[in-house]
């Protein structure tokens, strides 16, 4: 490989590592509320006799009262467990059975819903009344009666409450085998006159979390309404609220979903996909709470003596790609897979993920899947690699003639350049042909990096030896003699981190460089400069996911083997006597 091309390759790799999204941020700022669209529903049709629902109704203004275990009902499903708070009918206590916070066997399960006041994460839902109607509605202090003591995948739960004014409210809740809850709200009207109410569903976060994904992964408010993705930042929602309701963003449409996403976890509400709703992002400064959810734009009409109902779904769990797509298909939810931040290059990152996931299913290891995928990439790009090496070989062979032209025409740069280009054309050498494989492989590398970083399927995925999590950096460190000295050098500075796999990566990069420089007839001064590249990239890769480092180690070895084989064949072809056609 030409040394300039090798330098370009490393530069491109560094650029990819820094991240496409760093240079071209993909998360759009949350726009202000649209003119004419408010956080609450618009006035109902005149025939219904109902006006717009009041935003600050009793259902939302009341602060929750602390209760003990007697006000809770157990939730125990195959993938989740926790409790339902009967005070306010809140989903505020849920852990995931199949995910732990760390790789340690005694690590606690991941918690996605939390009733703690300092780190509150919960989902609430209920009804709003038109602004000109006075009616007692269930609120955060309402104590509901439950039909049982536990909700599981086979046994739904029904909550009931009578407002004492002729309205009876029921909530039927169920949970599936994974992370999806079905919420059916019913109203029975015994008042003797029609009632119009607006259902709402909302995700709440009572704190500003530390964002772990940086600019590579979106964390915060997220929604899809009318097939359009919107990602809001905590800062914009917190500072961009418009009084009096402190709504920073709103959009009216049909169906969709909205919630708050973390790197690997999601809380989301999914309204009736045929209903017209308004989705909002808001921040309540007094409580320090972020609120993301939906309110129906048209009221549910409950005639006298009749019962009306509305249904929605709540997701609280891990962002497993295939599971999200299955929910998208079963519930007809638009683009639910976009809860996983595959980025602007999702048309590439998603297929690469599915290939890796398929290989993992058949090989039983994401590490082996990465190694196999590397072989597939090398085979797919083999024709381009051969072309690149052939151009490099021809360029190296012409170097003496090029040096002669340079020395002869050093005082006439234009003539010198013209003769060099004429020589290359005569020998059919394309100086830009060697860059094509690099440009094509860079997006593949980026896809691997993105998939390792954002998909939960690779979180805590083990490999051989000391590698217990392919999505995390190598846990070993040269500066404490790989654990023999009992201290962590990264407490001094994060740059004192150099694991075993990054060291092996540097060795394989040095090997590939030696093979490349021998084929390119690199002069000694250039070789000395190139000696620093493996050292530089060894430290650079030390803080990257170890799965990516393993991929690059294996890729470097395969590249060096390819180059040795191709160069040997080119040398053999040059050694053969050339037949000269008679004149």
Image (tube, rainbow, N blue to C red):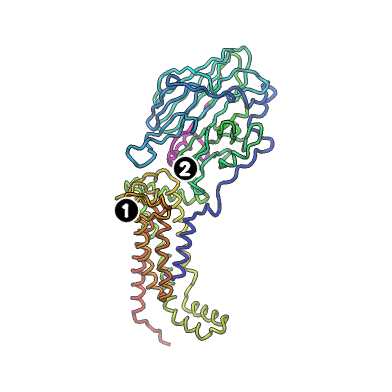
Q: Position of residue 161 (x, y in %)?
A: 52, 16
Among numbered discs 2 and 1, the one appearing first in the sequence: 2
Q: Left of 231 or right of it: where is 520? A: left
Residue 482: which numbered mark, if any? 1
**Is 395 rendered above or below residue 306?**
below
Going 29% across and 52% down the picture, which residue do you hit? 484
**Is 274 rendered above or below residue 583?**
above
Q: Position of residue 187 (x, y in %)?
A: 55, 19
**Is 308 rendered above or below residue 570?**
above
- Badge 1 element: loop
Which of the image's four quarters has the N terminus?
A: bottom left
3D distance between C-alphas at marks 2 and 1: 30 Å
312 within the magenta span = yes
Q: Left of 266 or right of it: where is 468? A: left
- Foreground label between 2 and 1: 1
Q: Which residues are magenta?
A: 311-335
Q: In which quadrant of the rendered view does residue 53 lie?
A: top right
Q: Around disc 2, counting alpha carbons within 10 Å, would you say few (fewer than 14), some (14 to 19), or many (20 or more)? A: many
- Is residue 270 among what the camera can see? no
421 within the magenta span = no
Q: Position of residue 243 (x, y in %)?
A: 66, 33
Q: Left of 168 or right of it: where is 102? A: left
Q: Which residue is mark 2?
A: 263
- Badge 2 element: loop
Residue 389: which numbered mark, if any? none
**500 or 390, nearer to the observer:** 500
- Is residue 381 among what the camera can see? yes
Which of the image's four quarters has the C terminus?
A: bottom left
Going 48% across and 19% down the picture, which residue do you hit? 159
């Amino acid at each position: 490989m030409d040394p300039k091309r090798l330098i370009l390759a490393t530069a491109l790799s560094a650029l990819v590592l820094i991240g496409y999204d760093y240079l071209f941020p993909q998360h759009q700022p949350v726009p202000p509320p649209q003119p004419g669209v408010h956080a609450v529903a618009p006035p109902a049709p005149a025939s219904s006799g109902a006006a717009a629902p009041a935003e600050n109704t009793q259902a939302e203004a009341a602060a929750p009262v602390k209760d003990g275990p007697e006000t809770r009902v157990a939730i125990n499903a195959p993938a989740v467990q926790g409790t339902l708070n009967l005070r306010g009918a809140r989903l505020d206590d849920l852990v995931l059975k199949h995910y732990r916070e760390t790789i340690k066997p005694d690590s606690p399960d991941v918690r996605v819903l939390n009733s703690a006041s300092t780190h509150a994460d919960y989902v609430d839902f209920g009804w709003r009344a038109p602004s000109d109607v006075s009616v007692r509605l269930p609120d955060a202090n309402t104590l509901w009666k439950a039909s049982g003591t536990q909700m599981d995948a086979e046994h739904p739960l029904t909550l009931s409450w009578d407002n004492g004014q002729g309205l009876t409210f029921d909530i039927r809740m169920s949970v599936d085998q994974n992370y999806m809850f079905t919420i059916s709200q019913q109203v029975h009207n015994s008042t003797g006159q029609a009632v119009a109410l607006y259902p709402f569903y909302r995700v709440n976060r009572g704190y500003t979390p530390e964002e772990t994904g940086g600019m590579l992964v979106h964390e915060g408010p997220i929604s899809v309404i009318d097939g359009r993705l919107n990602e809001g930042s905590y800062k914009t929602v917190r500072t961009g609220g418009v009084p009096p309701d402190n709504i920073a963003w709103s959009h009216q449409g049909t169906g969709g979903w909205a919630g708050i996403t973390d790197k690997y976890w999601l809380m989301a509400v999914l309204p009736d996909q045929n209903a017209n709703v308004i989705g909002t992002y808001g921040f309540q400064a007094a409580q320090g709470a972020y609120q993301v959810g939906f309110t129906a734009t048209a009221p549910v009409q409950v005639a006298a003596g009749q019962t009306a109902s509305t249904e929605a779904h709540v997701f609280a769990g891990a962002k497993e790609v295939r599971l999200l797509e299955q929910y998208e298909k079963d519930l007809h939810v638009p683009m639910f897979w976009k809860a996983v931040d595959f980025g602007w290059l999702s048309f590439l990152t998603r297929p690469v993920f599915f290939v890796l996931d398929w290989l993992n299913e058949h090989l039983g290891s994401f590490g082996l899947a990465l190694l196999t995928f590397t072989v597939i990439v090398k085979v797919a790009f083999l024709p381009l690699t051969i072309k690149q090496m052939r151009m490099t070989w021809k360029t190296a062979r012409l170097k003496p003639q090029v040096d002669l032209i340079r020395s002869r025409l050093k005082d006439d740069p234009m003539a010198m350049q013209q003769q060099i280009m004429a020589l290359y054309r005569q020998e059919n050498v394309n100086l830009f042909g060697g860059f094509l494989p690099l440009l094509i492989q860079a997006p593949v590398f980026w896809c691997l990096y993105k998939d390792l970083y954002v998909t939960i399927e690779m979180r805590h995925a083990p490999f051989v030896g000391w590698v217990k999590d392919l999505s995390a950096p190598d846990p070993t460190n040269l500066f404490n003699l790989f654990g023999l000295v009992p201290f962590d050098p990264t407490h001094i500075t994060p740059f004192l981190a150099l694991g075993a796999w990054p060291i092996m990566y540097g060795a394989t990069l040095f090997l590939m460089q030696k093979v490349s420089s021998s084929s390119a007839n690199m002069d000694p001064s250039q070789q000395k400069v190139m000696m620093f590249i493996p050292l530089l990239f060894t430290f650079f890769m030390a803080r990257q996911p170890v799965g990516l480092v393993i991929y690059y180690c294996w890729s470097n070895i395969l590249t060096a083997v390819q180059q040795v084989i191709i160069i040997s064949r080119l040398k053999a072809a040059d050694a053969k006597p050339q037949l000269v056609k008679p004149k």
